[in-house]
């Protein structure tokens, strides 16, 4: 599943939405050294071999570190609101088991809501609305409701 009739993905080839509407990230795994990469790559930065296979990455992990994006990033590539409509948001790295650390937008962004080492899960996040009225969707990570890593 790519997106519903009223949704469009922010970029092709980075992720898809599963049947429940949850993002699934596309990564690579080096068949020589087992290094995992995101986004997909044609060569391994660890061993320099070019024997990658495409894989789907885990949908849950652990918050490795985070900060707050307190001002609008440069557009493009940023697609969200700027000026008075901008709202700060969390940005961090989520460690997906023994696969890879993924730089990601977070659904929350205050010290009261985030703690390094907490369990996180991937969710769909609407960035903006395009000219045709479709929601432009990306992936983000949110604290898990149970605190469990799966």
Image (cartoon, rainbow, N blue to C red):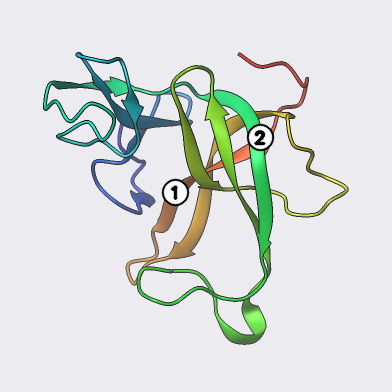
Closer to the eye: label 2 or 1: 2
Tell me which corner region of the image, top left, top right, bottom left or bottom right, holds residue 110.
Answer: bottom right
> x and y percent of residue 19 in the render?
41, 23
Say which of 84 and 4 sits in front.
84
Residue 133 vs 121, above or below: the answer is below
Q: Badge 1, how many Cα within 10 Å: few under 14, some, many 20+?
A: many
> x and y percent of residue 78 in the render?
43, 69
Residue 118 vs 142, above or below: the answer is above
Q: Which residue is mark 2?
A: 63
* Direction from residue 45 to residue 94 in the image, left or right: right
* Direction from residue 13 to residue 129 in the image, left or right: right
* Direction from residue 78 to residue 34 in the image, left or right: left
Identify the residue shown where x is 36% and y is 68%: 77
Say which of 106 and 65 sits in front.
65
**Name of the residue lying farthest toward the left:** 50
Do the CB atoms of the residues marked 2 and 1 lie less than 8 Å apart? no
Say which of 9 and 25 sits in front.
25
Identify the residue shown where x is 74% and y is 29%: 118
Quarter of the picture containing the N terminus is: top left
Residue 20 vs 91, above or below: the answer is above
Q: Earlier in the sequence, mark 2 or mark 1?
A: 2
Quarter of the picture containing the C terminus is: top right
> x and y percent of residue 104 in the render?
52, 46
Q: Which residue is mark 1?
A: 138
């Amino acid at each position: 599943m790519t997106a519903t009739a009223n949704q469009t993905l922010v970029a092709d080839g980075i992720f898809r939405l599963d049947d429940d509407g949850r993002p699934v990230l596309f990564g690579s795994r080096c068949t020589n050294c087992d290094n995992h990469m995101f986004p997909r790559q044609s060569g391994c930065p660890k061993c320099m071999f070019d024997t990658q296979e495409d894989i789907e990455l885990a949908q849950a992990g652990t918050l490795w570190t985070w900060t707050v994006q307190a001002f609008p990033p440069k557009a493009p590539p940023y697609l969200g609101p700027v000026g008075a409509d901008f709202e700060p948001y969390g940005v961090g790295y989520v460690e997906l088991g023994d696969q890879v650390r993924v730089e990601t937008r977070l659904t929350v962004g205050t010290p009261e809501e985030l703690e390094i080492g907490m369990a996180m899960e991937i969710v769909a996040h609407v960035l903006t609305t395009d000219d045709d009225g479709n929601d432009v969707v990306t992936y983000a990570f949110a604290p898990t409701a149970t605190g469990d890593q799966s």
